[in-house]
Image (cartoon, helix red, strand yellow):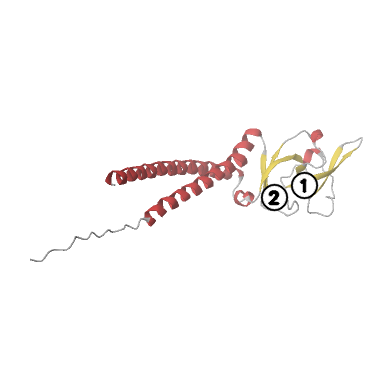
Amino acid sequence: MAMAGPMRHTRTLRYSRPGRVLPVVGRIGNVIAWIVASVTILLIVALVLVPRITGATPYTVLTGSMTPVMPPGTMVVVRPVDFGSIRVGDVVTYQIESGQPAVVTHRVVAINISSQNTTLTTRGDANPVADAKPVMEAQVRGTVWYWVPMVGYLTSMASGGDRQVLAQIAGGALIAYALFVLIAAIRTSRREKRGAGRRRESG
């Protein structure tokens, strides 16, 4: 009678690396989504909500006269100030012609005081000479409070009213997206915990 040899057990190793990689990729995607959403919301607050609350006005720099500090496409937020508080070194936004909508943003390089009035001499940081015409008080819209590079290219495609509507729509969409990402992350975390619990029980 033939005797059967000892039974051999073959162990099958399960290749689980892809299963571990996918959750990591998902977490990285969630982090990136949160960063993009957070930055966009901050931009909306800085360029739409804050100016509206404080009475400031956003303008887009269209030329290179203020490079490298404020290159073309920079959005500057300008707030009204008392004309007498302006000092040399301040960056002001003023009307090219008094009462006209076209404006320029340049740095004050001199304050000219006379018995008749006080005017400002301005110059773009990248310009070799000062502006030819002095700036009168009636022309000044305010001083630059803060600025954000490149954003002006996007906002310049819409008018003031359309810009606010687009900002509100974008803000609502980002909040909804952030909630979606948060809920998805919570569900993924719960599934991973359940899977880990089952593996411990089966082991």
Q: Nearer the viewer, residue 182 or 143?
A: 182
Q: Quadrant of residue 86?
A: top right
Q: Residues within 10 Å of mark 2 (few under 14, many from 20)?
A: many
Reading the image, the residue beneath label 2 is: 61
Q: Residue at x 67, y 40 (%)?
A: 57
Task: Residue 106 in the image: state x and y as whole percent.
Answer: 77, 47
Locate residue 173 relative to residue 103 in the image: left or right. Answer: left
Q: Residue at x 62, y 49 (%)?
A: 151
- Could you say whether the residue bearing mark 1 is in a helix, strand or loop? strand
Q: Residues within 10 Å of mark 1 (few under 14, many from 20)?
A: many
Give the residue at the far left of this rendering. Answer: 1
Q: Residue at x 44, y 52 (%)?
A: 25
Quarter of the picture holding the N terminus: bottom left
Give the residue at the far bottom of this rendering. Answer: 2
Give the residue at the far right of this rendering. Answer: 115
Locate residue 38 relative to residue 56 in the image: left or right. Answer: left
Reading the image, the residue beneath label 1 is: 106
In the depicted structure, whether residue 7 falls above or below residue 66? below
Count up the numbered dots: 2
Q: Nearer the viewer, residue 99 or 192?
A: 192
Task: Residue 26 in the image: state x and y as whole percent.
Answer: 43, 50
Q: Quadrant of residue 138?
A: top right
Q: Nearer the viewer, residue 200 or 39?
A: 200
